[in-house]
Image (spheres, helix red, strand yellow):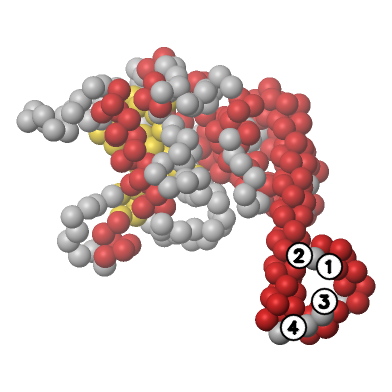
Amino acid sequence: MKGGDWNNGRFRPDNRRQCFSDAGFSGEPYRNVKDSVFKWLFADPKYLLQLYQTLHPEDKVTTAEDLDLVTLETVIIKDIHNDLGFAVGSKLLVLAETQSTWSVNIIVRSFFYLAQTYQNYLRKTKQSLYNTKPVELPRAELYVIYTGNSQIGKNEISLTEEFFNDMPCALETKVKVILEGEGHDIINQYILFSKVIDEQIKKFGRTDDAVRETFRICKDRDILKEFLESHEKEAVNIMVQLYSQREAVTEWGESQYAEGETSATLENIRELMKNLKLTADQAMQALGIPPAKQAVYKRKL
């Protein structure tokens, strides 16, 4: 597997730990678990090839060495990145992974992913859009892996159908939807893994117990068993770090909020004292500040 040349080396397929830390801490910690496992799993050439073979079973000759990772870290809008992108010959496959809440906005996200990936490709291949000769582009395939329980009812969604009532539009984007199936292929195993961790979160809350129990259940059910056995110790340790770091971020956010609230109250006290000629005690009483906190504000005036 060639290693993300289009992305100027920003995607590091050999750095598994980085795949976890890149997930971020906004939103739910268990979202980071699924997102991180997705990135870590398919950063491995062995499992990436299995994914490609699931999508293209007719291709019997492509090997892991033929796959070129082009996953994006950031696309146009802050904190938006695609989960997986890779090229195979003249094909470009871009995958996004959704959670339990379905949204057709994935079509727009996929369009952004594709546009940025094409831009990176043109830069890498030194092609200019201002030349008279048509540029050469790989043929794109867009996918979304849905891990929730809602009935989507379709295997492909399109921009014109979902957003413009099938009216003619200057732009069309089609995304294939991959749902839970009956097989044991690598994509279906990942979907089942995601559903197991959702179940364990409901049972244990967003704790490392939920992660450990998810790993145990999946190994018992032969869901990503080989992958989880190979990386369990490191993965669980990283998951625990994710939870701990999120708690630290939450505490920091609460302290920042409290500090901002104090500054705003002090400003209000000063305004009343200045404009209405009130004493500090009168101003705090007018603002309804509890007597127990008035001494604290007085010291800061």
Question: CB of mark 3 within 8 Å of CB of mark 1?
Answer: yes
Above or below, 39 against 175 in this view is above
Q: Which residue is mark 2?
A: 262
Q: Nearer the viewer, mark 3 or mark 1?
A: 3
**x and y, in percent, of residue 267 in the image:** 70, 69
- Tag 1: amino acid: Tyr
Which is more toward the observer, 184 or 99? Answer: 99
**x and y, in percent, of residue 32 in the image:** 63, 43
In percent of the image, x 58 and y 35: which residue is there? 22
Question: CB of mark 2 within 8 Å of CB of mark 1?
Answer: yes
**x and y, in percent, of residue 79 in the image:** 50, 45
Disc 1 or 4, which lies upstream in sequence? 4
Q: Which residue is mark 3?
A: 280
Q: Secondary structure at mark 2?
A: helix
- Report which quarter residue 237 is drawn in: top right
Question: CB of mark 4 within 8 Å of CB of mark 2?
Answer: no
**Image quadrant occupied by the C terminus:** bottom right
Answer yes or no: is residue 211 visible: no
Q: Residues within 10 Å of mark 1 (few under 14, many from 20)?
A: some
In percent of the image, x 76 and y 47: which residue is there? 247
Q: Which residue is mark 4?
A: 277
Q: Residues within 10 Å of mark 2 (few under 14, many from 20)?
A: some
- Tag 2: amino acid: Thr
**x and y, in percent, of residue 243 in the image:** 75, 43
